Image (cartoon, rainbow, N blue to C red):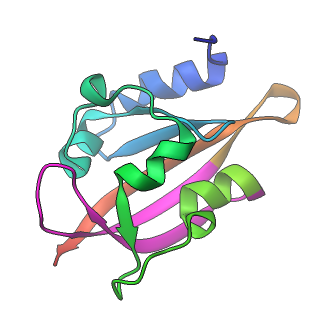
Amino acid sequence: MAQHPIELILLKQWATYIAIPVWLMDVEGNLVFYNEPAEALLGRRFDEAGIIHADELADLFETTGLDGEPVPTKELPVVVALTEHHPAHRPLRIQPLDREEWLEIEVTAIPIEGEGARHLGAMAVFWETART
């Protein structure tokens, strides 16, 4: 496994201290970390899930708009931040891996830029707004 840039390592460390769910993706779109508050919403500990490759994410985490219609992957806030290099926000519904109920969440994602304008990935913060 390749070494992550220092900026991602520091963000991972920062995320372990934050009380809001945080999700980190590398420049290839792989999920490289989510914190303990995110584990509670997603329904699986990161230590159990490990790094999840980009092509597996859509199949693992079911996501819809608030209307219940599927959201194209390219329109998810973290993907917008990753591919278009600008912040994005959207309300969504997710189905945690450990239960049947859907959760309504708000997601805000930002691109991660390193020194010299190196694009390093994206970070999303999200929180539950309602259960459906």
Q: Residue 102 location, x and y as percent?
A: 20, 69
Q: Residue 12 location, x and y as percent?
A: 46, 26
Image height of 105 relative to 97, above or below: below
Q: Nearer the viewer, residue 49 or 66?
A: 49
Image height of 62 relative to 125, above or below: below
Position of the C terminus, as image quadrant, is: bottom left
Count of marks placed on residues: 0
Query: In the drawing, does residue 89 fall left or right of residue 61?
Result: right
Q: Quadrant of residue 100?
A: bottom left
Q: Residue at x 66, y 55 (%)?
A: 81
Query: In the drawing, does residue 121 fall left or right of residue 99?
Result: right
Query: In the drawing, does residue 125 fall left or right of residue 109?
Result: left
In the image, residue 12 lies in the stretch drawn in magenta? no
Q: Residue 15 location, x and y as percent?
A: 40, 32
Q: Quadrant of residue 66?
A: bottom left
Query: In the drawing, does residue 51 fall left or right of residue 99?
Result: right
Q: Residue 46 location, x and y as percent?
A: 30, 30
Q: Which of 79 and 56 is in front in this view?
A: 56
Q: Residue at x 46, y 55 (%)?
A: 58
In the image, residue 109 lies in the stretch drawn in magenta? yes
Q: Give the range drawn in magenta.
A: 84-110
Image height of 52 relative to 131, above or below: above
Q: Quadrant of residue 116?
A: top right
Q: Which residue lies furthest to the bottom in this view?
A: 67
Image height of 62 relative to 104, above or below: above
Q: Which residue is drawn at 29% across and 44% down?
A: 38
Position of the N terminus, as image quadrant, is: top right
Q: Nearer the viewer, residue 40 or 44?
A: 44
Q: Which residue is drawn at 41% across and 53% down?
A: 59
